[in-house]
Image (spheres, helix red, strand yellow):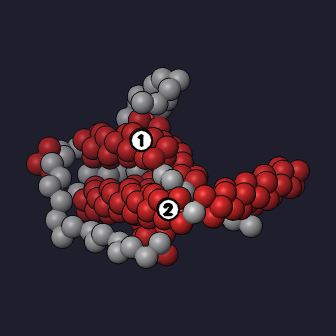
Amino acid sequence: MNRSSFFLPPSSTSALLARRRTLGAAVLSASAVALLGGRDALAAGAKTDARQHEADVRILNTALAAEYEAVAAYQVGAESGLLTSGVLPLAQQFQGHHKEHADAIAGAVQKMGGKPVQANAQYGFPTDKLKAEADVLRFAAGLERGAVSAYLGAVPLFADRALAQEAASILGDEAMHWAVLRQALGEAPVPSAFMS
């Protein structure tokens, strides 16, 4: 049972398992048809699967690079000396979330046989523009908003639906970060009914 099914009520878990069995039968039937259709159909499917697999690894590595950037950005904010004692723990907590995201994504890339990207040695953050706590919060909120948009765009691109589900989970966390940072700035935490 995967991690997400622990959050479902027992009746939903049973329904999920039934759907998986049905989908498994459908995949088996599709494979049988491909075999009956000859090796060409099977080879074409294998090439498509390999391309989709490679595309998923590329998407994951792009997300991993963004998570490393967020970890570094929160470090800049924490070391700036501009965050008050009420805000600093929040920034450190969010940085911890990004570290967890990065670890999970790097693990997924490795599990898929890919090589995870590495964090940059340096990032070109606009540190000269960070003069007050509000500047740091706006900077962090902008990064979180960008992360929401990036994950929103990535989720439907995954061929592996389990990866899409994990990316959607991270998207939700990034959206909460963005909302909390907006609230800390005295702005409406949820400015509209839809994200784009």
Give the SS element for disc 1: helix
Label whose residue precedes the other's in the sequence (2 or 1): 2
In the image, what residue occupies the spot 32% across and 52% down? 83
Q: Residue furthest top?
A: 192
On residue 40, which mark appears? 2
Left or right relative to 80: residue 13: right
Q: Residues within 10 Å of mark 2 (few under 14, many from 20)?
A: few
Horizontal and vertical percent position of residue 19? 78, 52
| Mark 2 and mark 1: Cα distance apart in space | 33 Å
Left or right relative to 17: residue 3: left
**Which residue, given by chain and number where applicable, does mark 1 sit on?**
153
Dot 1 amino acid type = Gly
Q: Nearer the viewer, residue 19 or 8?
A: 19
Looking at the image, residue 114 lies above or below residue 52: below
Q: Nearer the viewer, residue 2 or 158?
A: 158
Dot 2 amino acid type = Asp
**Residue 47 quadrant:** bottom left
Q: Residues within 10 Å of mark 1 (few under 14, many from 20)?
A: few
In the image, what residue occupies the spot 47% across and 72% down? 112
In the image, what residue occupies the spot 48% across and 52% down? 158
Horizontal and vertical percent position of residue 2? 69, 65
